[in-house]
Amino acid sequence: MSSEETALIQRLKQGDEEAFEQIFRRYQKRVYNVAYRMISNRETAEDMTQEVFLRVFQKIRKFKGKSSFSTWLYRLTVNLCLDHLRKRNAHPTESLEDIEEKALVYGKTPEDDVILEERREAVQRIISSLPDKLRAIIILREIEGLSYKELAEAMNCSMGRVKSLLYEARMELRRRIERNKHLFKE
């Protein structure tokens, strides 16, 4: 953690609202992207983002700095999303609006190659169909770029469990892509 971030977190622990606003602006997009990729619904991801930052404000005093702040924030986000998915007890279904929103999250522009975009959307749909924990670990590793150590902290498990989950997630993703290879032909 940078000294600037450490000072910001200390100010937040003292109840400084400006520090909270700075942290919110700094991390809002990342939290939203993780929530959106896990939940696959724009409105729910926005709600999850708000809930994550509410919890940050409520629980910041429990943050001891043993992991980076961003890892702690990812853990809050993933746990909240997993809880939401468990309560809903079903995998998300995607509407046309959700698919279009996903395209925007990934930075689609009108000039993008149509085939590439269709493939990207197909992969995202397949990722969205993975079981919750496998989806979370794929998103955090392959999309958000967390290290194995950060994954272990964010998923609250051992490094060995992270490697096992990641292997299982990649194999399942590969199987599902293979089953849907017709979506990837030119």
Image (spheres, rainbow, N blue to C red):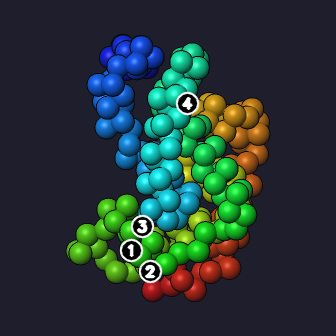
Of the image marks 3 and 4, the number of the one nearer the N terminus: 4
Q: Indicate the secondary structure of the residue bearing disc 4.
A: helix
Residue type at numbered disc 4: Trp
In the image: residue 34, left or right of residue 115 = right
Residue where numbered disc 1 is placed: 100
Quadrant location, the C terminus: bottom left
- At x 66%, y 58%, the residue is 85
CA gap, disc 1 to disc 4?
A: 30 Å
Mark 2 neighbour density, 10 Å: few (under 14) some (14–19) many (20 or more): few
Q: Which x, y percent locates residue 47?
A: 47, 53
Q: Which x, y percent locates residue 98?
A: 45, 72
Which label sits on residue 96? 2
Which label sits on residue 72? 4
Q: Which x, y percent locates residue 20?
A: 36, 28
Residue type at numbered disc 2: Leu
Residue where numbered disc 3 is placed: 102
In the image: residue 105, left or right of residue 128 = left
Mark 1 neighbour density, 10 Å: few (under 14) some (14–19) many (20 or more): few
